[in-house]
Image: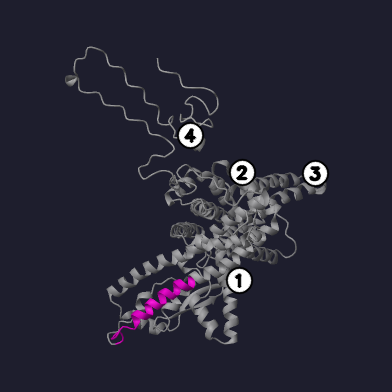
Amino acid sequence: MADGRDQAPAFSFRRAFPWTEIFRCFQVALDPRKLAVAALGILAMSLGWWVLARAFYYDEPRRENPTYLAATVAKDYQNKPVPGDPEAFFTQVGAERFEDDRRRWVAMDELAGPFGRFRLLPWDEYRGPNPYLLVTKVIGGSSVERDAAFRDFRLGSLPVLVEPLTKFLVPVSKLFAPESGTATRLLALLAILWFLAVWGFCGGVITRLAVVSLTNKGPTTLRQAVRFVAARYLNYLLSPMVPLFIIAAVVVGLMVYGLLSLIPVLGDIVLLGFGFPLVVAAGAVMAVFLVGLVGYPLMYTTLSTEGDSSDTFDALSRSINYVYQAPWHYAWYSLVAVVYGAVVTFFVLFFGCLSVYLGKWAVSQTPLTETFNRHPDYLFLYAPQSFGWQELLLQGSPAAVKAVAKPSPSDRQVFQNETIDPARREKYRAEYYWYNYAGAGIVAFWLTLMFLMLLGFTYSFYWSAASMIYLLMRKKVDEADLDEVYLEEDEPEAPVAPPKPDPTTPPGGTSLNVLPAPAAPAPPPAAAAPTLPFTPPSPPLSPPPSSVVIKEMPPITPDELKGGSNGSTEGPPLNGPKGDGLTPPSPS
């Protein structure tokens, strides 16, 4: 038994290594509510980008276009001196114009082309090899196949986890790319605004659900999280936009500065000569906010955690300050989240692929399937291409496909599914009836829904891990407890426990320490009251229930029972303690 002295506290692994709290995010991210919100956000973002890509895309410029011919260029140089041979000069200028226009088109094609980042819908985008096929290749393949499998996992599967961040940073980078033209920059800007509009809401709901779960202050409902974010949606929307607005303002200022520098002497010597440090300082301001966008996920988690005590500028300042004040901690937490998230994401995707494949395989074992030519392969003709689902589910069938790398004008690796045997596929599809197409369409709907939920796990884990990283960074920089979170009135901190019963209370419910007040006698009916010659005295007032308390009397000694030391048989005095010489007054 313990001797009452203070015991040494037990060693806590998570207290010693706080970054292990990130491992809790796997279970938190599996919440079906977060998966559904993430799937909705992925679908809304992709559809909006698809519309923008179709609206902005234009055909590739051709060298034989009249715009680039020497005769057309000559019209622009009328009455202007031309060095050397005019024909050769005009031909060179036309070629330079063509190269500039094509370089701008390549930047546009990378975003809005047939295989562009904004053009591909979620189920058509390449995200690495199929997890099931990857595992089977590692288990039963040769050493070369194993090396290829690990390379594909590193290049295809790992980037999937940081997809929410890359989807935001890619259009941001296109704003400052020198090869981007005016149309490409406008497309990138509109894509950023749509991304922030969608994920300002969906990401806010996911982070709100996550922080309440991670701080053990739940439960909270999806309706409460939606109402919480909707009331602060403007802050969620503007927090990531403020750095972009500041960068845009600095760019406009430098453009005005550049116009003034066109003035001879003043621009060369004063503005661009002695004033060059001002240009560098303006560039440093832009660099601070641009690098600070790496902490962009912390903006949403700040608003979801702090509630009414935070706003747009507080979310911005916290995200940037945490990144710059503790950069190594932020880098370490992010690395742990990415590596751990890649493993659990691969497991979730593998489990989903395995479930679909085993179900399809079991159905294909039905007797007489081959006799009636009812093999279920036709049901997966429209399966999602992403994660190699179509390749897996059509494997071995006449319609089998394989992901093949395609050349891209931007030298970006692009994959597209190609039919292994086109002639056999066409013959196979010629035997389809209308109900075969209908069945394949319905199966494709369910597979797409399941695919969006599995892909939504990557987004759910990303935002859940960002919530945990924010709590860790806040503890490191601001020394705040991990379980501090803003709760509204309809979000209780913990379930209210029933009061503990008093051990001295009998089953009837009245404590033994309090004497219940005697019930007042009910007055008799007026008709039955007898006529008395005198007025009866009023009954004594009943004491309040809490005024009468049973007190424990001291034990009576043998001397008191005998009447004292003088041997008298009289009891102890009634109005005082023993030996005080007082006797009760005689009745008159």
Contact between marks 4 and 3 (CB within 8 A): the answer is no
CB-based contact (under 8 Å), mark 2 and mark 3: no
Residue 313 — which label?
2
Crowd tier of the residue under label 2, counting other residues whose Cα lies within 10 Å: few below 14, some 14–19, many 20 or above:
some
Q: Which residues are magenta?
A: 349-370
Instruction: Look at the image and say whether residue 454 sits in the magenta stretch.
Output: no
Q: Dot 3: what SS?
A: helix
Q: Nearer the viewer, mark 4 or mark 3?
A: 4
Dot placed on the residue nearer the N-terminal end, 1 or 3: 3
Q: In the rendered view of the protein, which quadrant contains the C terminus? A: top left
Residue topped by disc 3: 266
Q: Residue 515 placed where, x, y %?
A: 40, 34
Question: Residue type at mark 1?
Answer: Asp
Quadrant location, the N terminus = bottom right
The answer to whether residue 536 is above or below residue 418 is: above
Q: What residue does disc 1 label?
A: 411
